Image (cartoon, grey):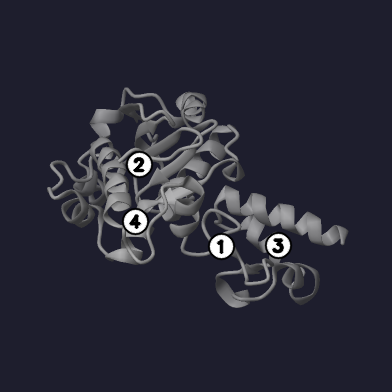
Amino acid sequence: MKLNLKRPLVVFDLESTGLNITEDRIIELSYVKVYPDGREEGPKTYRFNPEKIIPQQAIDVHHITNDELVNEPTFKERAHDIARVFEGCDIAGFNSNHFDIPLLAQEMSKAGVSFDPSQHKFIDVQTIYHKREKRDLEAACQFYCGHSMENHHSAADDAKTTLEVLKAQLDHYANDDEPLVNDVDFLSQYSTHNRNVDLAGRIIYNEQREPVFNFGKHKGKLVKDVFTKLDLGYYDWMMKSDFAENTKQVITRLYIQFKKQ
């Protein structure tokens, strides 16, 4: 199955020191880049010194130790190289909309390198899979591709397997009553659980395409109403709290927009 692409698609996977987007660090990034003519580049892997101790519970998952990374560059030192990998491309991953993309955006922000999510279409292969079969990447590989993964939780193997599963999904549902369309715009929309305004989904669009809070005491309320009428200090509280940089950038844009109205 040849993917129908308008521009290159980067299929990637991360390993990290943990699952906290604002505090944990990327230690490994692997990707396969697919071009509109069908060429594939990779998988290519970068490793980074996280400048913090990797908890044993994380090592038990990805088997990457602190000693292996001590002589690797930091993410900040390679951030411009990583940005060039994704520049002008759409992006795919497994559970990437929920974790990999927000963590990547956070690391880019810490490094002072621009990463604008609005310039990319995102395909989350896990969301497609869960909408159809509701299992994990290892089961997806077995179900769609007919074989087991050899090295689960290796970023390079996960990225390569994610691409293989995406192609197999398009084949598998080609003659379905609601077929998957071999088109990045369709797949990006289909693999998005909700209408996120920020990458972490703290702010989402309602049915009227108005931004609303998706967490906490103001969940379901219009951001405009909270910021301008209901809780005038909420913006300041969010900016001082432990939210991802992308979320803070989004609420700042909305805050300025609503204050001008």
The three-letter amino acid code for the residue at tag 3 is Tyr
Residue 20 visible in the picture = no
Can residue 168 be seen here? yes
Location of the C terminus (image quadrant): bottom right
Residue 113 in the image: state x and y as whole percent.
58, 32
Task: Identify the residue position indicated by label 3 in the image.
Answer: 235
Judge by depth and name the residue closer to the eye, 213 or 85: 85
Q: Which residue is mark 1?
A: 195
Q: Residues within 10 Å of mark 4 (few under 14, many from 20)?
A: many
Label 2 sits on residue: 14
Q: Are marks 4 and 1 in contact (CB under 8 Å)?
A: no
- Label 2 – label 3 distance at C-alpha: 31 Å
The label on residue 126 is: 4
Could you tell me how far apart the alpha carbons at marks 3 and 1 are, in whole angstroms? 21 Å
Q: Quadrant of residue 221?
A: bottom right
- Label 2 sits on a secondary structure element that is strand
Specify the amino acid type for callout 1: Arg
Number of residues whose C-alpha sits closer than 10 Å to that of mark 2, classed few (under 14), some (14–19) or many (20 or more): many
Q: Is label 3 or label 1 in front?
A: 1
Three-letter code, disc 2? Leu
Between 42 and 167, which is closer to the camera in this rendering?
167
Q: Which-is-in-front pick, marks 4 and 2?
A: 4
Mark 3 near mark 1, Cβ–Cβ under 8 Å? no
Mark 1: which secondary structure? loop
Q: What's the residue type where badge 4 is placed?
A: Gln
